Amino acid sequence: MTIAFTICSVNYLAQARTLGDSLKDTNPDILFIIGLVDKLDGVSFDSDYIPSYPMIEIDKIGIENLDDIAERYNITELNTAVKPFCFTYFFKNYPKAQNVIYFDPDIIVYQPLTEMLDSLEKYQAILTPHMITPIEDRKSPNELNHLNTGVYNLGFVAFRRSDEVLAYVKWWEEKLTYECLIDLCNGLFVDQNWMNFLPVFVSNVKIERNMGYNVAYWNLHERIMSFKNGMYYVNETSPLIFFHYSGYDPAKPTVLSKYQDRFELKERADAIPVFEIYKHKLIENGNGYYRKFPCAYIK
C-alpha cells in the first residue's frame, strides 16, 4: 500500500484538489490524503466545493504541544513544521502502508509513479535536488540561493517504511519543533536544510536525477518541455512525471513564478501549455472560492 499526502490550509484547497485529481487520474491505487493546517469547526463549504479527498486536521494527529508550535511559527513555517509528524501518523495508523510520499499541494502528477515505486523497493528514501547542472547566469535563484535554502526541494520526498526511516523522521520532528524557521542568517529555511542530513543519517537514499521529476522554476534552465504522442516530455527524452508550480498565481497568469527573475513565461513557449493546464484546473477547483477563507492558525 502507498499513501501520498499533501499539507495545506483551507485557502489552498484548490491546489490540493488539483493534485489529488492528477493522482486519481494517473495513480488510482495510491491513497491520497490532505493534511489540513486549519480547523473545520464552523466551516461550511458550498456543495460544489466539498473536497472529495479525506482530510485530517493537524490537531487530530497527536502532535505534542501543537499550540506552542503554532504560536512560535508563521503559517508558512507551521505548514512545513508538521510534515514529519504527518509521516509518523501515516506509518503508525496505516500498518499496511509500505510507502508514504509527500507532495506540495501546488504540484500536478502527469504519469504513473511506477518508476518511483520500483525505486522504493530498493531505496529507503527518494529526494530531488533543486538542480542537477550548474547555472550560467547571475539571476535568481542560483547556486548560492540553494546553499541557503537547501540542496534538495522538500516539495517532494518519499519514504519506505524501515527502522532507519522512522528514526530519522523522529529526529526530524524534534528539529522542526523549534527550528523550522525562515532565518537565513542562522542557516534555516523551514524544513529544507534539515533534509541535507537524510543521505548521511539513512543508508541507501536515492538522489533522483530523472529530469522528469519535480520540474519547477528553479530548474527550468536545464529542462525544456515538449509534447508528443499524447505525453509531455522533458528534454525530448524524459516523460514529465510531476511539475511543481511553486509561486504561480492564476490571477497573474503571465508570471511564471513570483520567486524568480530568470524567465518570463512568454519567453518559455515550451512551458506555456503546462501552465495553462494548471491555471484552468485551479479555477475549476475553486481557487477564488477557497482563497477567501481565513486560516485558524494565522496570528
Image (spheres, rainbow, N blue to C red):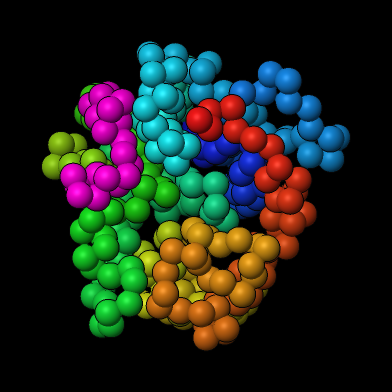
* Residue 117 visible, this angle: yes
Which of the 4 quarters of the picture holds residue 50? top right
* Residue 80 visible, this angle: no
Which of the 4 quarters of the picture holds residue 205? top left
Q: Residue 254: x percent and y percent?
A: 61, 75
Using the image, determine if residue 210 lies above or below residue 45: below
The residue that appears at 61% across and 61% down in the rendered structure is 249
Using the image, determine if residue 135 lies above or below residue 54: below
Using the image, determine if residue 88 lies above or below residue 280: above
Instruction: Please state the total of marks drawn on the protein image.
Output: 0
**Residue 251 within the segment the image draws in magenta:** no
The residue that appears at 73% across and 62% down in the rendered structure is 280
The residue that appears at 26% across and 24% down in the rendered structure is 174
The residue that appears at 69% across and 18% down in the rendered structure is 41
Q: Residue 137: x percent and y percent?
A: 28, 82
Say left or right for 185 vs 47: left
Q: Which residues are magenta?
A: 170-190
Q: Residue 130: x percent and y percent?
A: 32, 61
Q: Residue 54: x percent and y percent?
A: 64, 29
Single out the residue that lies furthest toward the front. Answer: 299
